[in-house]
Amino acid sequence: MHRNDDVRLISSSIKIPPPPKPLKETAPSHIAQLLRSFNTHSNHFTRSLLLCCATLSLPGQRRPPSPILCSASLSLAESTQPREGQLKGISSSTTTSSSSLASPPASVRQSEERVLISEVLVRNKDGEELQRKDLEAEALQALKACRANSALTVREVQEDVHRIINSGYFCSCMPVAVDTRDGIRLVFQVEPNQEFKGLVCEGANVLPAKFLEDSFRDGYGKVINLRRLDEAISSINGWYMERGLFAMVSAVEILSGGILRLQVSEAEVNNISIRFLDRKTGEPTIGKTKPETILRQITTKKGQVYSMLQGKRDVETVLTMGIMEDVSIIPQPADTGKVDMVMNVVERPSGGFSAGGGISSGITSGTLNGLIGSFAYSHRNVFGKNQKLNISLERGQIDSIFRINYTDPWIQGDDKRTSRTIMIQNSRTPGTMVHGDRDGGIILTIGRITGGIEFSRPIRPKWSGTAGLLFQHAGVRDDKGVPIIKDQYSSPLTASGNNYDETLLAKVETVYTGSGDHGSSMFALNMEKGLPLLPEWLSFTRVHARARKGIEIGPTRLNLRYEAYLSHQEEDE
């Protein structure tokens, strides 16, 4: 039997893909790739980790011909350029006859020439039988064209080399032709992958260890299958994608001893900056809002893995401040594999005046003859800290109301998101409907001067609490401003018997809002207590509870509402 001296094997350890540089040098490209994939709304992170190709040629030779000589090369590398240390190629070459040497055909015709094969075998890279018959069966099952007693072309052999590699169990495959007494024997010399003995994962700071273990649990103790490995990597990338996290498996390497090394690139937030844009031109401008007022609303913090979902919630939170017209987040690649988060904001006009007037048909007496008017000033961003100031005056012929309301939605220096509201109000309303007219047609008015402060904060998810103090000075006067303590029925108009009543009210309220959707569950409990710090001040207790529950009955939704009141007045001894 003639020896085929042109069969050569060139191989090395397999890396998928091989990390040519330390992670800190390659990470920025991965981050840029992540940003591009998110900006184009890519549906998956998985980058191609397994790129295989095989070529088979039938070149002419000047040495004595042998029955069949073939050549094949197999490469496993990234698509950009081959790297040193990759699996370079497996080749052998022969010609079919001396006549073909005299007039070598074109390469296309060579690939179409057929050679009769009497036997097809699968062996290890040394030409010996595989110890594991199941791997031999996998290789034979992958073959489609190469069968015993069949005439094959070089292209068909090449395609079957591809199929063996694509089965995922082998890191190299070389076809070898052997001349035997019974004909040409085609031997596929394969090198199986190592058995999976352990896993090392680097850079996965937010990925749960249990999820990682479950992804590879079925492969322990088995020959590494590159196709299943790619599926496991896709599941890890899918876990990040489902949570909107900027992260991906950037490198995989099979080390000696069957140890699988995974390198994960997670894009941590490096810097967070606020950029104000002009409402008309869209160009950067100087904003009125202090940047720290916006930054404290954002839950994304420096050092966290950037999340698109969390960024979306941050945008919605900033919009609910009521001082921004438009908000968007632009992630940008930063050094050392991190990402900078730039929040573009367009401010709304911060405040203004309004006025109005009209005529009430229900009031026809007096010099103004039913004329009413209103004036208001509002500022939604006092001092650039998102503090709200509202001043309003409504004036009619008899009634009037003047309000000053100042709200700080987040007290500076408080980490519990506590808000503070200060309110002052002076109102005058007609009391004729309740107490009737005095003798001579004198119209009674009820005057109230109210001032108070309230603090509110979230207690836990869906629960909020409010506590405050409210002082009220109230009394009844006639149209000349003279205090009245009894109406025309001789009933007292003040609880204390004085010209006016004064009350210091303590208020506590807790509210459960459910999902916040229309028809969702809601519960509120309000308790008020009059504090008699002075003997003439009123003392009482009021409790008010209300609840709402939505019940679905088939296609119909039934909303139930419950309310309960409890009041207790303490009498003077």
Image (cartoon, rainbow, N blue to C red):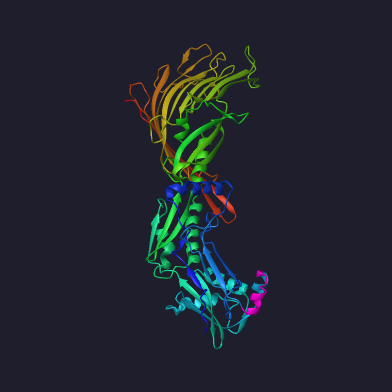
Answer with the quarter of the image where residue 501 lies: top left
Rendering coords of residue 263 (x, y %): 43, 55
**Residue 376, how many percent across, how many down?**
56, 21
**Residue 458 sits in which quadrant?**
top left
Residue found at x 54% / y 33%:
345
Residue 25 % position (x, y): 45, 47
Q: Which residues are magenta?
A: 96-107
Rendered image quadrant of residue 113? bottom right
> At which x and y percent is residue 498?
40, 17
Q: Is residue 462 visible?
A: no
Check the picture and name the quadrant holding the C terminus: top left
Q: Is residue 414 above or below residue 49?
A: above
| Residue 450 visible to the viewer | yes
Query: With respect to residue 29, does 394 lie above or below?
Result: above
Residue 97 on the magenta segment: yes
- 225 vs 498: above or below: below
The residue at 40%/19% (across/down) is 497
